[in-house]
Amino acid sequence: MTQNTLIVSNWKMNFNFIQAKNLVTNLKNIEYNKKKISNVICPQFLLLPILNKLLEESDFVLGAQDFHFEFSGAYTGDTSIELVKDYNCKYSIIGHSERRILHNESNSMIKKKVRLCLDNFIIPILCVGESIEQRKKNIYKNFIMKQLTECIEGIKCEKLVVAYEPIWSIGTGIVPTVGDIIEISELIFSFLKKKKIEKFKILYGGSVNSTNFYQINSIDKINGALIGGASLKIDEMEKILTSC
Ligand code: PGA
């Protein structure tokens, strides 16, 4: 069955109010095939309230970039899933490599987030992907399988998005070959099938732009992309959204 294409914009720690408002206003004017594409924007937490208003009655939905693994408590500086939900986030990125590396997030912590997400009816976008060293040593497949297993083992996921994001491709302009993406997407696909996840999508992320998007999105088991740098540019987004 052909699935809708899911395009997730990961704005990371970019944009002030005015820049965010400008981009969203322009994005809303793009004419693209809304029946075929679902669009998610993941801004910084403090942009959620204004974007929630600006996106009202649009076809764009909001997603979070992260949240704390506990529902509430003494966690200074963290943000709870409850607030993310209050601002209408339908998705949340979980376990992005920047969080794993810069904030020491472990698979067991990420698993708690997956569970909390599902308990709160938010669809997890679970990121997995290897470092360049792991690829060179040819241990990348085992590493990705370990990440997947440890992040969702024992959890009943009705809906799940898995994003394959090789660390060496994020923000570098280096993209794996189509063959490399096919290999990993098939690995993830059979893992999720075996786990009997009812509804899932597999995204690719890492230096996606308007030049490579079409080819990547045409890969059989790939259902869309998680886009960082290019998602901040209106001309890139317009080309991406109108190419499918
Ligand atoms: P990039 O980022 O598109 O800038 O490589 C992707 C990501 O980190 O999700």
Image (cartoon, rainbow, N blue to C red):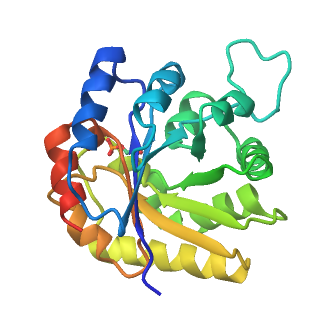
Which quadrant: the C terminus?
Answer: bottom left
Above or below for 206 versus 164: above
Total marks drawn?
Answer: 0
Q: Is residue 49 above or below residue 84?
A: above
Q: Is residue 12 above or below residue 127?
A: above
Where residue 99 appears, as percent x and y from the top left, is 57, 34
Vertical placement of residue 133 versus 176, above or below? above
Say whether residue 199 is left or right of residue 182. right
- Identify the residue at image location x=69%, y=20%: 78
Residue lying at 59% horizontally and 70% vertically, measured from the top left: 200
46 left or right of 5? right
Occupied quadrant, residue 158: bottom right
Q: Quadrant of ligand 1?
A: top left
Return the residue nearer the eye: 208 or 116: 116
- For the residue pair 242 and 128, the one nearer the viewer reads as 242
| Image point (71%, 34%), residue name | 81
Residue at the front extreme of this rendering = 57
Q: Residue furthest bottom?
A: 1
Say left or right for 105 vs 120: left
Q: Which picture quadrant has residue 216?
A: bottom left
| Position in image of residue 29 (x %, y %) | 21, 43
Q: In this rendering, would 69 be left or right of 61?
A: right
Q: Position of residue 140 (x, y in %)?
A: 51, 64
